[in-house]
Image (cartoon, helix red, strand yellow):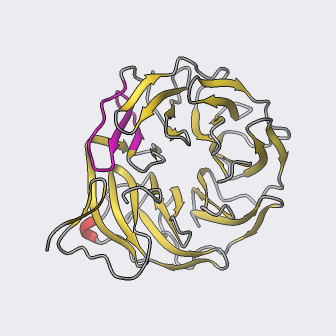
Amino acid sequence: MATITIGPGITMGPGITIGDRPETQQFLLVASGSMSVYSWSSTGFGSLIRILGSGVSTQSGGHNFAISPSGAAVVCSNDNFPYIQASTLAGTRYADPSSATPGATRNVAFSPSGKAVATVHSYASPYATAYAWNDATGFGTKYSSSPGGIPAAVFDLAFSPTGGAIAITCYDSPSVRVFAWSDVTGFGAQYADPSSLSLRTITSVTFNPTGNVIVLGDAYGRISAYAWSDATGFGARYTDPSSVPSQINSLQFNSAGNAIAAAHYYSPHVTVWAWNNNTGFGTKYADPSTPVSSTAVVSSGAAFNLTDDAIVVGFNVSPYIAAYAWSNATGFGTRYTDIRSQNSLSQIATSCRFLPANGGQ
C-alpha cells in the first residue's frame, strides 16, 4: 500500500486507513516529556504519528507548549538552556533564538496573527520575553520592550483573540497583569487592575473565543471572570462559580465559547461549566462517570477537540491521558479506550492540544 501525505509532514502509511465517512481529520499533540502527535477520529485515539525529535520537549513538571495559529509549528517551554525550543509539526527543529530568555520558562503563547511568540520565566527578570515569529524561519528578533511591574513567580500568559492585549499571571497581588500588545512594537502600557479581585496566586488565564471575556483561576481552586475589551481593559466581574478542590492548572473554552473546562488537582480532576457571555457561568456539568483516575493527584491540562464533541485530560499517573465524548447538551459521555500500550506515554502529560482546523491538512 502506498503512503499518502495528508498534510505538512503527516503521512498515512500501511495499516493506517482513513474511512469513507465524512469527518474532520484531527491530530492531538501531547507533551509528556517528549512531544507526541496522535491521530484522532470519532472513535478516539488513533495511531502515534510521530514523536518530535531533535531535543524538542517540555520536560516534566508544569511546562507547556503552544501551536502556531497556522498549525505548522510548536514552541515549548523548558528548564534547560536555551529555555525555549521550536519544531515544525513534521519534526524539523528551528534554530534557537539568537537572544535567549534570562532563565527557565514556564509557559508560552503565540499572538493570534502568528507573528509573535511570548514566554514567561518565573524567577528571572523581566519575567516575560517575546520574539517575532515566522513559520518558515522560526524565531526572529527579540522585542526590546518588556512588561514592567511583574514580580517573581510567574505562572501563565494568554493573548486576547483580537491581538491587542497580553495577560500574565503571577504570585503577588494583584496576581494578573494585562498589557497592551502590538506585533510591531511588543509590550505596551499596563491596563488598570481589575476591581474586586479576590483571587490570589493566579495560576491560569484564558480569554473566550471572541475576546470579550477573561477568565482567571488560582492556586486555591477559585475562578473569576470579567468582561474584557482591548480598548478599555477589565469590565464588570461575573458571579463566581463554586470552587474546585485545589489549584487550577489550565482553563479552556470550547470553540463555540459556550462551555469552559478547568483542569485541577484532585478528583474529579476536570470540571466543566456552561458559559453565556451575558450571564456568565451556568450550570456545572456532572463529573465524568468513569473517573480520570483513582490515584492521580495532578490534572495538568484539558482540551476540547476541534468539533467540540470530545474532551481530553492529562494527569500524573499511567495512562497519563484520558478522553471522553462530549456534548454541550449533556456533558461528559463515554470514556474512549485509552491509548494503545505500544503508543503509550511514559510520564505526566503536562499539556495537550488539538491542532488547528487547518493544521496538518
Q: Position of residue 330 (x, y in %)?
A: 65, 80
Q: Position of residue 116 (x, y in %)?
A: 50, 33
Q: Nearer the viewer, residue 87 or 156?
A: 87
Quadrant where the image shows the C terminus? bottom left
Q: Residue 89 in magenta? A: yes
Q: Main secondary structure of the magenta part?
A: loop
Determine whether, in the image, residue 306 is placed left or right of residue 215: left
Q: Nearer the viewer, residue 181 or 268?
A: 181
Q: Residue at x 62, y 73 (%)?
A: 287
Quadrant where the image shows the N terminus? bottom left
Q: Residue 240 in magenta? A: no
Image-quadrant location for residue 27: bottom left
Q: Vertical placement of 356 versus 177: above or below?
A: below
Image-quadrant location for residue 44: bottom left
Q: Nearer the viewer, residue 222 or 134?
A: 134
The answer to whether residue 160 is seen in the rendering is: yes
Q: Vertical placement of 12 versus 63: above or below?
A: below
Q: Which residues are magenta?
A: 74-97
The answer to whether residue 151 is seen in the rendering is: no
Determine whether, in the image, residue 353 is placed left or right of residue 331: left
Q: Nearer the viewer, residue 186 or 238?
A: 186
Determine whether, in the image, residue 139 is placed left or right of residue 241: left
